[in-house]
Amino acid sequence: MSHKNSIDLQKVPQHIAIIMDGNGRWAKQQGESRIYGHYEGVNSVRDVVEGAGEVGVKYITLYAFSTENWNRPKEEVDALMELLVSTISAETPQLNKKNVRLQAIGNLDSLPPACLQELNESIDLTSKNTGLTLVLALSYSSKWELLSAVKQIAVDVKKGILSPDAISEEHIKKYLCTKQIPDPELMIRTSGEHRISNFLLWQLAYAEFYFTEKLWPDFRKEDLYEAILNYQNRERRFGKTSEQLTQTK
């Protein structure tokens, strides 16, 4: 029986963030180059996005390429950029068919022109879709995001637009890449690693973390459903006690 049948559709996380780790190790196990693993990982993206839509998840954010990934061998980076362009181009019709809207966060201006153009075209072509929103984190890192936010806040304070005493958590959120996206309730990382690797540091403050030994190319919608079930069996206290939560029910 599918894990999907056990999910409480009224308690599905609105936003799930995923660190898609293990492509290179998976490829090595197959005796192939690292880029082969990235190509196979696209199948996992397709299946997981479909599965998320089926149970009512509203947002999926995928850590597709970090600012640190630019330091990888040029051959791998170039292949990843080519894969990104070809995948976005090929998948856009399917995104529209499934009513999925595409968005992206990160230092997008650092992407190769062809990649950025393809990305912007797909974002525009899917902008009217009203189902799940697929967010690609590209050339992204939280330290870059927070540094950019601090600089923008400093500029607005200098201009007199914002008073230092008025700065609040809500103000800071408005300067982040995710200002129009709810914070994730669940973060999934594949491949057995137990860290968040500079991903959504601010936004994951109260998220539930789920780690699995599966490498990303082996991760499918059934694995997503298992993670959601695990999430639904946890008690989310947000700093309160279990007794306080019981009293408010």
Image (cartoon, rainbow, N blue to C red):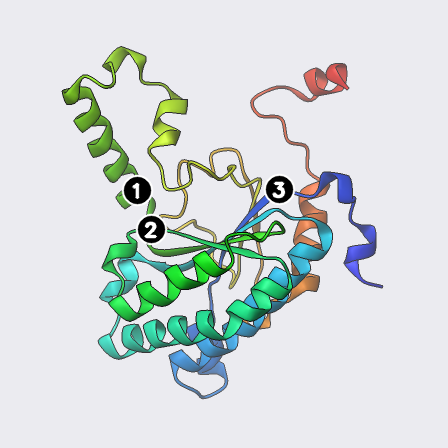
With 107 as the anchor, is 40 left or right in this view? Answer: right
Vertical placement of residue 139 versus 118, above or below: above
Dot 1 amino acid type:
Glu
Precedes in sequence: disc 2 or disc 3: 3
Q: Which residue is mark 1?
A: 145
Q: Quote the CA–CA distance across marks 3 and 1.
A: 22 Å
Q: Residue at x 33, y 78 (%)?
A: 79
Residue 215 seen anywhere in this rendered image of the structure: no
Vertical placement of residue 80 versus 229, above or below: below
Q: Which residue is mark 2?
A: 106
Mark 2 vs 1: CB contact within 8 A? yes
Precedes in sequence: disc 3 or disc 1: 3
Dot 3 amino acid type:
Gln
Dot 2 amino acid type:
Gly
Q: Which residue is mark 3?
A: 14
Where residue 214 sits, quadrant-wise, is bottom right
Q: Quote the CA–CA distance across marks 2 and 3.
A: 21 Å
Q: Position of residue 27 (x, y in %)?
A: 46, 80
Precedes in sequence: disc 2 or disc 1: 2
| Frontmost residue, 143 versus 158 | 158
Q: Secondary structure at mark 3?
A: loop
Q: Secondary structure at mark 1?
A: helix
